[in-house]
Image (cartoon, rainbow, N blue to C red):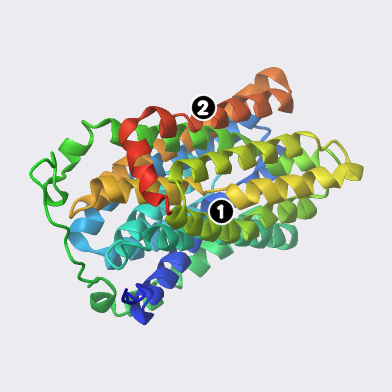
């Protein structure tokens, strides 16, 4: 046997690091939103569902913009796509810092930040990284998807510190200005070299292949059960995840924690995301991907159950359980779905195809956030919110078992 050269060359590793940093900036903006729930309710007197609807618009725009981000990546390349994302992110925060009406928050934190999340998110980053990796693609995707954790921790911690010191309006303005100042640095990077990619040996085509790598188009992909199965995973799982995330900081505050301590504890889940992502990516290269996916759902459900048990500071062990279980599995369905999608739909149109798949996640995050606030408003009960989350998480795992092409591709990860 001969040793194959590592796919993690210097330039390929640099691409992974760059995508991680861009993804972190793209995620820290929407992920800091739970810190705004309390201040907005106090200043404007809005109900929980009204405030949550702002994040719902953001998540919806991110999801619906996924195909556009993929198309722009395929046509124009990542340089101007990322620069546009930073521009919209910074501009959206500055708009929010001056907003006084709900529609203004929809525009700034909803439309602008939502589109920025698509430009700097998993669609464009997956498309760029897939040019440099094949056998180790699940691991590479796990590394860049773990930017969700870094972005969550930085966004929650930094924004809460700024809010405590200067108020929420100044915090939004300072964060927006900081992101805009990063654009010149982004533009001077060696994009021609970063986007060149690696040449891979193409597998021999067989006569019984119904659709070859080169023939996949968006029109062909959306007619397959695999496309809708993967989109359903994103949609249903996002409902379960974001129905808890949007309420988490306020939930802890109402049970005796200070706002800063609550944000810090929820932010700690972000520190564990890279560990969970990398571990998941490694397991995907070694074992049956469906088994790995099921394991992530079991742990996430356990995390929600732990948070449900927290009632006062004496039960801090429940928060620790939530941080560990929820943090280690938050976002892990991303590399699972991303690696499966790359196997099924790999080709020159992968960016726009995967972008359309991620629409499910955006819509799911939007609906999960909205229904979380709506359920709380009509019941006054976090128990009803947690029940909704657990039901969605259990249902989110079903496509891995009931869609044949997903089961088949999942077995590729098995090693003997």
Could you say which disc has been placed on residue 411 in the image?
none
In the rendered image, which residue does mark 1 sit on? 97
Instruction: State the count of labels.
Output: 2
Look at mark 2 in the image and give the residue it sits on: 395
> Residue 367 at x, y = what percent?
49, 30
Q: Quadrant of residue 160?
A: bottom right
**Is residue 198 rendered to the left or right of residue 252?**
left
Seen from the viewer's position, the closer of residues 91 and 405 is 405
Circle 1 SS class: helix
Is there any visible trace of residue 340 in the rendered image?
Answer: yes
Q: Taking 74 as reference, is 304 left or right? A: right
Q: Name the residue at 43% across, 35% down.
A: 233
Q: Residue furthest top?
A: 378
Q: Residue at x 53, y 39 (%)?
A: 294
Helix, strand or loop at label 2? It is helix
How far apart marks 1 and 2 lie (CA) works out to 38 Å
Q: Quadrant of the C terminus?
A: bottom left
- Residue 125, image quadrant: bottom left
Residue lying at the far left in this picture: please name it. 207
């Amino acid at each position: 046997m001969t040793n194959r050269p590592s796919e993690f060359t210097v330039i390929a590793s640099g691409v992974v690091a760059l995508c991680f940093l861009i993804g972190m900036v793209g995620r820290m903006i929407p992920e800091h939103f739970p810190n705004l729930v309390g201040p907005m309710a106090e200043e404007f007197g809005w109900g929980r569902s009204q405030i949550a609807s702002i994040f719902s618009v953001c998540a919806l725009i991110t999801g619906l913009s996924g195909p556009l981000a993929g198309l722009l990546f395929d046509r124009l390349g990542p340089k101007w796509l990322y620069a546009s994302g930073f521009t919209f992110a910074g501009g959206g925060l500055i708009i929010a810092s001056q907003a006084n009406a709900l529609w203004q928050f929809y525009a700034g934190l909803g439309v602008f930040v939502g589109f920025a999340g698509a430009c700097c998110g998993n669609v464009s980053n997956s498309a760029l990284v897939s040019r440099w990796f094949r056998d180790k693609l699940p691991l590479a995707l796990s590394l860049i998807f773990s930017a969700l954790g870094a972005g969550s921790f930085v966004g929650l911690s930094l924004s809460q510190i700024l809010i405590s010191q200067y108020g929420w309006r100044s915090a939004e303005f300072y964060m927006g200005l900081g992101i805009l100042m990063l654009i010149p640095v982004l533009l001077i990077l060696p994009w021609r070299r970063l986007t060149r990619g690696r040449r891979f040996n193409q597998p021999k085509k067989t006569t019984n292949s119904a659709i070859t790598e080169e023939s996949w188009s968006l029109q062909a992909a959306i007619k397959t059960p695999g496309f809708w199965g993967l989109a359903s995973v994103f949609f249903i799982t996002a409902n379960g995840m974001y129905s808890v995330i949007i309420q988490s900081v306020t939930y802890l505050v109402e049970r005796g924690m200070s706002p800063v301590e609550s944000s810090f504890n929820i932010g700690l889940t972000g520190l564990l995301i890279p560990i969970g992502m990398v571990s998941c990516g490694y397991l995907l290269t070694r074992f049956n991907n469906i088994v790995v996916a099921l394991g992530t759902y079991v742990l996430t459900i356990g995390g929600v159950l732990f948070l449900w048990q927290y009632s006062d500071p004496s039960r801090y062990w429940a928060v620790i359980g939530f941080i560990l279980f929820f943090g280690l599995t938050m976002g892990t369905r991303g590399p699972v779905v991303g690696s499966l999608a790359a196997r099924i739909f790999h080709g020159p149109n992968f960016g726009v195809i995967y972008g359309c798949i991620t629409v499910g996640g955006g819509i799911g995050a939007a609906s999960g956030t909205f229904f979380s606030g709506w359920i709380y408003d009509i019941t006054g009960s976090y128990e009803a919110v947690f029940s909704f989350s657990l039901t969605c998480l259990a249902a989110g795992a079903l496509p891995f078992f009931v869609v044949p092409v997903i089961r088949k591709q999942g077995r590729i990860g098995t090693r003997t």
